[in-house]
Image (cartoon, rainbow, N blue to C red):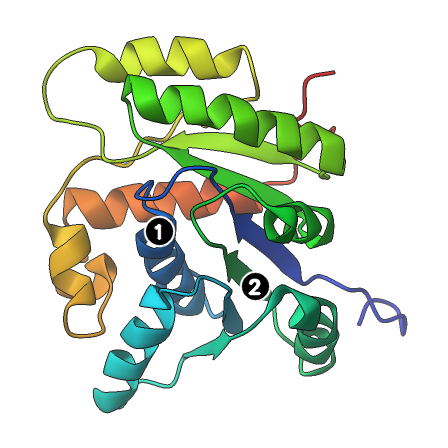
């Protein structure tokens, strides 16, 4: 509420990729907790049939944590769920999609404020990301960016991948490295910030969250 006028500040981030195994679900879970730790009211819509985030949410619930609401959903339910989330005062909504290119991804892109496309620094992932970028442009997403994920500790593949992706869409300066902490934390319903809040993995997730919540101009989409 600003000067007596309701201002909709809910941000919707959709994780999308035409290729499975890009790390969407892992990033979704860690981002959700990061947002919660920033005193945001957080919800995750899990559209992936594998339901990895929903399973993580159940494990988290068994730990007595109720800070992140995870809902298994179908794409047809997304508009209604977003309306419900907005009415209930959600600040940050993450939509995790299946690892494939289909109408589900296109519809979700249109509903999102930000489309986040994780991409591993491999030739197969970079080539698959060309299709994702094409989908993004057709869907006229408000803002779309790549994030390099599972970056190895050594080598220059991530530099080559960054150069290739930059010709398609903006690439965030923050990179997510291939730390075992990302998977270890999820095993019992935690996030990297809860496993090791001072660790490099936690620092990267916080940096990613900051970039996603920055106010930036334009759509972030190359014409």
Image location (x, y in percent) of residue 207 = 37, 41
| Earlier residue among tags 2 and 1 | 1
Image quadrant where residue 208 sits: top left
209 relative to 117, above or below:
below
For disc 2, the neighbor class at 10 Å (few under 14, some 14 to 19, many from 20) is: many
Query: 14 left or right of 205?
Result: right
Tell me if I can see residue 171 in this picture. Answer: no
Q: Which residue is mark 2?
A: 92
Image location (x, y in percent) of residue 59 = 24, 81
176 relative to 109, above or below:
above
Image location (x, y in percent) of residue 220 = 66, 27
Query: 19 left or right of 220?
Result: left
99 relative to 84, above or below:
above
Tag count: 2
For disc 1, the neighbor class at 10 Å (few under 14, some 14 to 19, many from 20) is: many
Q: Which residue is mark 1?
A: 27
Q: Which mark is residue 56?
A: none
Query: 99 left or right of 170?
Result: left
SS at badge 2: strand
Of residues 212 and 157, the one nearer the viewer is: 157
Image location (x, y in percent) of residue 4 = 89, 74
Residue occupying the point 67% across, 73% down: 77
Tell me if I can see residue 42 in this picture. Answer: yes
Of residues 220 and 40, the one nearer the viewer is: 220
Nearer to us of marks 2 and 1 is 1
For the N terminus, the image quarter is bottom right
Residue occupying the point 56% across, 47% down: 213
Residue occupying the point 57% across, 52% down: 13
For the C terminus, the image quarter is top right
SS at badge 1: helix
Q: What distance separates the C-alpha of mark 2 from that of mark 1?
A: 14 Å
Of residues 182 and 215, the one nearer the viewer is: 182
């Amino acid at each position: 509420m600003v000067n007596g006028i309701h201002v909709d500040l809910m941000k919707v981030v959709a994780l999308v990729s035409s290729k499975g195994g890009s790390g969407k679900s892992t990033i979704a879970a860690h981002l959700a907790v990061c947002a919660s730790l920033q005193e945001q009211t957080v919800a995750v819509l899990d559209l992936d049939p594998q339901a990895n985030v929903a399973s993580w949410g159940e494990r988290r619930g068994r730990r007595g944590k109720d800070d992140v609401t995870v809902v298994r959903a179908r794409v047809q339910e997304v508009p209604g769920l977003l309306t419900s989330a907005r009415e209930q005062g959600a600040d940050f909504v993450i939509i995790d999609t299946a690892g494939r290119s289909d109408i589900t991804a296109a519809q979700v892109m249109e509903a999102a404020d930000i489309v986040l496309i994780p991409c591993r620094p491999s030739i197969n992932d970079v080539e698959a990301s060309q299709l994702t970028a094409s989908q993004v442009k057709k869907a006229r997403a408000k803002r779309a960016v790549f994030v390099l994920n599972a970056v190895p500790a050594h080598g220059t593949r991530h530099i080559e991948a960054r150069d290739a992706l930059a010709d398609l869409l903006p690439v965030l300066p923050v990179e997510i490295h291939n730390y075992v902490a990302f998977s270890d934390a999820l095993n019992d319903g935690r996030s990297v910030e809860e496993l090791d809040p001072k660790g490099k993995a936690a620092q990267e997730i916080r940096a990613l969250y900051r970039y996603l919540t920055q106010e930036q101009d334009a759509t972030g989409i190359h014409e």
